[in-house]
Amino acid sequence: MGFVTNQKDIVKCAKKCYKECFTIVNNVPQSKKKYRNNFNSYAEVDNAIADSQTWIGESSNLSQLSQTYMHSVKTKSEKKVYSDICAILSVVAQIAIDSAKRSFAIDVSKEIKYLRKKLNADEMGYPKFWSAIHPSFSDEKVKRLRCPMNRLENFDFRVAPRTRIKVEMEETLKNVPLQKRAKCTAKALLRRVNDYAKFISKCKMRLLEEDANYSKENFNRDCYTAKQSLLWKCKSYNLKGERGEGIYSYIFSLIYGMKHADITEIDKEWYANMTDTPITKGTMTTGILNVLADLNPKSFAGAFRQLDF
């Protein structure tokens, strides 16, 4: 995934970073662990990739704190401590990002835990912007620290993102008519995805309840197996070409409550009844989009029109 823009300020900074900020080269050896061609190994790899996403965010947050402390403390010795932690975290973050492609002979979770303890954030406190991006964050932990990100406190996060997403969907979604009997296919696909979402929700609840017999590895294995099974069952559906684009356009319109030539009030009622349960709330949209994207990327993309910026 890449971010493309012609915004002048961002392009200028990107060119400067490309010339002056070099990529880190670490000497951490790659892991020699070997995997088998089976679901258990697939689940292990999937679990490692999922963990790497957490590591990226955690190492970035700790790096931000270390830089904040580095500019907030007064003595050279203190500045060096936080400067060294920041340098180590930059390597950890790179390893976390590369973990999607290869594994390293290092326990990243252990390293992050050690560095978090060394930062001693509970005593040092957090910069003001922390409360702006974490609504439930206690203001008692915020202290007067030097950090440019504190400017975020003046930005209203509650309205802009949600409004922007809705406008983008309305502007980009095509209204592709359904071909003969395609509505039956769309509804059958939605039923299967709904069952999948219910199963994943139950697994999440079991994990959150800290079931002694259900670990994160079990959760990732079950999610992987369930998704592969769902994709296999849905392969019989004809989602190619204009037929597929019509099905996708119909489903997207149904999900986001938009107008579509082939959606009736009965369809809206059916979808509301099928999804309006506590166990599927918050999971249906993501589940459907992920499955549809994996089933037929071309038809998925074809349900959206290209815009000129």
Image (cartoon, rainbow, N blue to C red):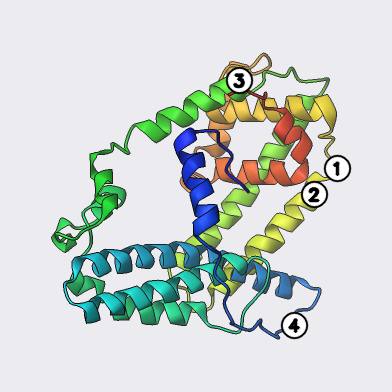
Q: CA distance from mark 2 to mark 3?
A: 26 Å
Q: Which residue is mark 2?
A: 233
Q: CA distance from mark 3 to mark 1?
A: 26 Å
In this view of the protein, which residue sits in the foreground, 89 or 80? 80
Asked which secondary structure carries label 1, the reply is loop
241 vs 258, left or right, is: right
The image quadrant that residue 39 belongs to is: bottom right
Q: Is residue 205 above or below residue 293?
A: below
Q: Which residue is mark 4?
A: 34
Q: Residue at x 32, y 39 (%)?
A: 157
Cβ atoms under marks 4 and 3 closer than 8 Å: no
Q: Earlier in the sequence, mark 4 or mark 3?
A: 4
- Mark 2 or 4: in front is 4
Q: Is residue 84 above or below residue 175?
A: below
Q: Residue at x 72, y 75 (%)?
A: 41
Q: CA distance from mark 2 to mark 1?
A: 7 Å
- Residue type (three-letter) at the residue carrying disc 2: Lys
The label on residue 266 is 3
Neighbor class of circle 3 (other Cα within 10 Å; few <14, some 14-19, many 20+) is few
Q: Earlier in the sequence, mark 4 or mark 1?
A: 4
Q: Which residue is mark 1?
A: 236
Please provide percent x and percent y for residue 179: 81, 20
Q: Earlier in the sequence, mark 3 or mark 1?
A: 1
